[in-house]
Amino acid sequence: MSLSEAQADVAPPEVPGRRNAQLGRFAVLTLGPVVAAVFTSALILLAFGVNPVTYYGFVVQRGLFSGLGLEQTLTRMAPLLFLAAGLIVSFRAGIWNLGVDGQFLLGAVAAAALAPALLGVVPGWLMLLAGFAVAGLVGAVWSVLPALLRAYQGVNEIITTLMMTFLGISLANVLVKLVFLDPGTTVPQTRTIPVADRLPRLFDSTISSGLIWAVAAVLLVHLVMTRTALGLKLRTVGANPHAAAHAGLSVPRLTVLVFAASAGFAGLAGASELLGVNGNVRADWNPAYGLMVIPLVFLARFHGVGSIVFIFFYSALLIGSESAARRVGVPQDFTLVLVATLLIFLGLAEWLDKRRRKERA
Amino acid sequence: MDALLTAAFVSSLLTGAIVAGIPLLLAGLGEQMSEKAGVLNIGIEGMMLFGAYLGFLTAWSTESIWMGFLGGVGGGMLVAALMALLCVRLGLNQIVIGIGLTLGAEGLTSLLHHFQFSRTYPRLPSPDRLDLPILTDLPVIGPSLFGRHPLVYLALALVIVLAWAYRHSNLGLTLRAAGEKPAALDVAGGHVTLLRTVAVLFTGAMAGLGGAYMANVGAGLFIPFMTGGAGFIGIVLAMLARGRPVWVLLGALIFGAALSLTTALQVAGSNVPTDVIQMLPFAAVMLVLVVWSRKARLPAALGQPYERGAR
């Protein structure tokens, strides 16, 4: 998928009569891969002797239609959405930040280190704000090296961000086990923030209010990238860095900015999980959300609202499959298969669409 | 610090460097060929893992470790064939498909293992070794360096063969053309698609073999997610080696040593936390990139699908 194509979808031309064609394209490019992925994965389940109808039924029932399940689904969305916000920035600017997992974990550890220390010293809202701020900052700092290497030396960022993510995961463990560990517990983990001091919950539910900030972040990113001059500059850099340089844009500086923003959001994702849900970071904790959010952002073609919708369904899948692992006996890693087939069918749909348009032209 | 220099430490470090380094070497050599031909193969982690799974399963059911290696090669090539079809033939985005194949292999092998073995992890008998006469009897370094599984020597021979082929045969030049300027190769009568397909399949074979070595010789069992980023290290090795197989070997041994330093240090009675040690190879790569980044050069058409007649 090329970036320019994805951007062409942002503002479809308002020509009457083309609406049907647009809808048809949407069906082929978005619903097609989803249906194909769900169906192929069902065949894989069948091959393992699991009734796919039972499995999917259980997942949907647990993740979407049970009260508690839906609340868990909505809570789980918060970190995924923050990650999506970061990925939208970098992908639209043509930068492959594949190191969000390391940035996420270090952000979470930074917040886990700072927030309990501030507990009782400053007002609760300030503690939460400081936690988010430090997490975003640490996430951004973790991307400085790949950013500078890419901006000034042209080193491929896929490699450097992957290296930094492995490094970050280990560093997060070192910090939890050696530096920020709670002396009061035997298992290595950071000091726990009491439930009452975490992000407030919404209404009478268990949904963390991190969700609201996360949705706001995605929408903000979407508007900045599609409706502002800065967004246009960044997209130009992504579409054609040479042209951008000719147009007088400072490509290296914009590149560093993109990395910082993208990684900063990944750090915020860590903070939202820590300050909203977990309250502490345990040693060897790594939910590895990053690689899973990438396909969803692609599926939405870097569109903010689309990403929110897909992340909602994916989040329900995660919650549902967690219970299904215990009740239906299918390991949760099945979701990996589902996401993988989704990516492949996404590519195929893109290819079909390109070929069809070429034939018409 | 004296304890660090004991014979037991040196010997376990050398052993570790080889046992952990060989899969990295194979993956790196495979990735190198892909990259030369212009395909950035992010799916290599999945190829390794599938090779590890199928390699283990074959070895376990046929009770032959060599059949296991063959199974590993097959497993890796299976994933690679998918990659070749989607990315070389159809020209889909190599990064998206690469991530997809890696995730798919992770999920599928985990499911397969679950439904076959549930929570048990059957072990293979320890593999036979090829003891090189005299050399194996050398003190300290002998058993570590010269008493290894035959595949180790084959992998080393492959480094020499590839180095020669890249430098002195037509293959090296055509591969480079496919990676630098595929259109020129096409005009000259070469087959870009065919060449890239073969390169990707070779990557799959090598990655699968590396995975099978990991499972059958290194661990003696299969655990889901056992490759743990080794494929990604292979990508880095290939990028840093700038097209030279010998450099891949060097890098693989250094990474292998760093990855196994934890065990060696435990043998020596030191208790540095494993997480600190695990950071070393990745920190080393970043350092190398910072210092030598100007020289890191990748093929011009890397990651771009080739379509005849397209601009």
Image (spheres, coloured by chain):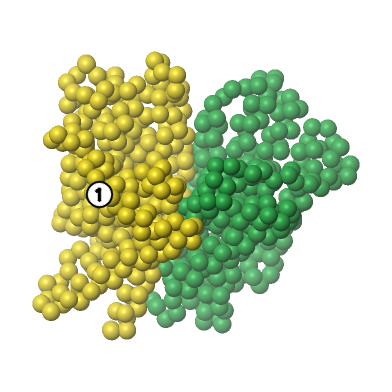
Chain colours: A yellow, B green
Q: Residue at x 10, y 77 (%)?
A: A16
In front: B113, or B243? Answer: B113
Q: Residue at x 23, y 74 (%)?
A: A24
Residue A286's place in the image compared with B193, above or below, is above
Image quadrant in which the N terminus of chain B is located: top right
Lateral position of residue A309 relative to residue A42, left or right: left
Residue A356 in the image: x percent, y percent?
32, 79
Residue A4 in the image: x percent, y percent?
28, 66
What secondary structure is marked by label 1?
helix
Is residue A259 in view?
no
Lateral position of residue A77 relative to residue B95, left or right: left
The residue at the far bottom in this view is A360
Category of crowding for the residue at label 1, using alpha-carbon neighbours closer than 10 angstroms: few (below 14), some (14–19), many (at least 20)? many
Q: Chain of mark 1?
A: A
Residue A279 in the image: x percent, y percent?
30, 28
Residue A27's place in the image compared with A136, above or below, is below
Residue B306's place in the image compared with B76, above or below, is below
Q: Residue at x 62, y 62 (%)?
A: B74
Is residue A117 in view?
yes
Q: Amino acid at mark 1?
A: Leu
In front: B180, or A278? Answer: A278
Q: Residue at x 66, y 56 (%)?
A: B58
Reading the image, the residue beneath label 1 is A64
